[in-house]
Image (cartoon, grey):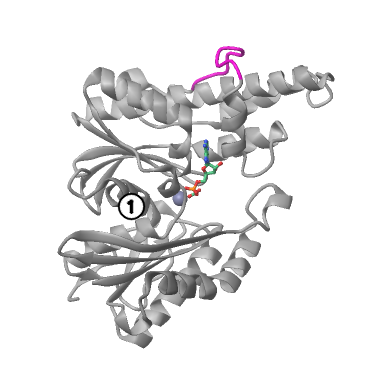
Amino acid sequence: MNLLAIETSCDDTCAAVLHDGPDGVALLSNQISSQMIHAEFEGVVPELASREHMRLLGPVVRRALAEAGIALGELNALAVTNGPGLIGSLLVGLSFGKALAYALELPVVGINHIEGHLASAALDLGEALVVPPFVGLVASGGHTEIVRVTAWGRWDLLGATRDDAAGEAFDKVGKLLRLGFPGGPALSRAAAKGRTDAYDFPRARLGIERGGLDLSFSGLKTAVKLFLDRAGWPQEPRDPGEREHFVADVAASFQEAVVDVLTAKLLKAAEVSDTRCLLIAGGVAANAALRARLQGAARERGLTLWIPDTRFCGDNAAMIGMAGLHHLRRGERSRYDLAAIPNLDDWEGFYESGV
Ligand code: KG4
Ligand code: ZN
């Protein structure tokens, strides 16, 4: 089966083509067009994001099909993100995907973006290796959720951020440190040269000793902001060398606090749900310090840890395609009147049998 997958839930316009055959899944193309228009605003502007998706999606889909060497007539199904995400952005990809599926008389499956991130490790590391049940952490610019996946497409939410997402905290602190947008990758580069124990920023534990798995990052972000205000930043320090050290130390100390909390919560989730396999995904899973810490912790405890290659951590359509295959193989499809759902809380299946 040849599957076209589309992802437009935030600010990346993505299309991928997957082939599901007797030898497993082959990723034939994975096109990602990251919108640069938001950089000058240092954050994603929803209205601009949907307009950019409208402009970019047609060419991105055409490029994906050309790279895969698959004609429209050779497609067998479509998978498209229908939530959660920015409503305008979701609508562009979903309308495009549904219209194309309808015109080609093909099944379409709506995919939960979080489910897509969770599927990325199986796509990258192999379906034989990455098998539920596992405890997964999806940490990105819009989400920080800990789930227990019982089967592909079925999961229980164990904990979530009560305020900012982990990636959002990286972006906001990156902005405070004048590292540009998105702050996550730039901040982690700066942190590599800093001391993780230079400053003691707070860790929101939220009852972890009693099994509390919710997270919070807004207090940490505010603590960094207050610290910077007190230090006289951005006027001080004046010496360029000192400035660079200062930024590196703040970045490393902030990152350490985030890594501490994410690691502790994921390990706790494994403990309370009696699960020995862990998985991380989402943009923040590209963070080298988080990857290294979790690898060490998993090794120490004899737990299995799956992390996709960094190119599958951020938003992409390949992961949506992988999640789509899980549904299609079970004979599930969505209706052509499938709606876009911006909030995770409102999301539910929307599948029916009969492919
Ligand atoms: O999954 P993703 O591409 O989009 C969303 O679904 O939000 O995640 C993007 C987020 C941004 O907040 C970005 O700053 C963060 O992931 N990110 C990182 C790193 N690379 C991307 N955060 C920390 N360290 C990184 N290396
Ligand atoms: Zn994402």
Relative to 62, is 123 above or below? above
| Residue 215 position by quadrant | top left
Relative to 163, is 13 above or below? below
For the magenta stretch, what is the residue range? 194-203
Q: Amino acid at mark 1?
A: Glu
Look at the image and say whether residue 204 sits in the magenta stretch: no
Does residue 212 appear anywhere in the picture?
no
Look at the image and say whether residue 199 sits in the magenta stretch: yes
Does residue 43 appear anywhere in the picture?
yes
Mark 1 burial class by Cα count in 10 Å: few <14, some 14-19, many 20+: many
Mark 1 — residue? 115
Which x, y percent locates residue 75? 31, 78
Which x, y percent locates residue 263? 38, 26
- The one nearer the camera, 149 or 20, is 20
Which x, y percent locates residue 298? 28, 24
Quadrant including the N terminus: bottom left
Residue at 40%, 23% in the rendered image? 293
| Residue 52 position by quadrant | bottom right
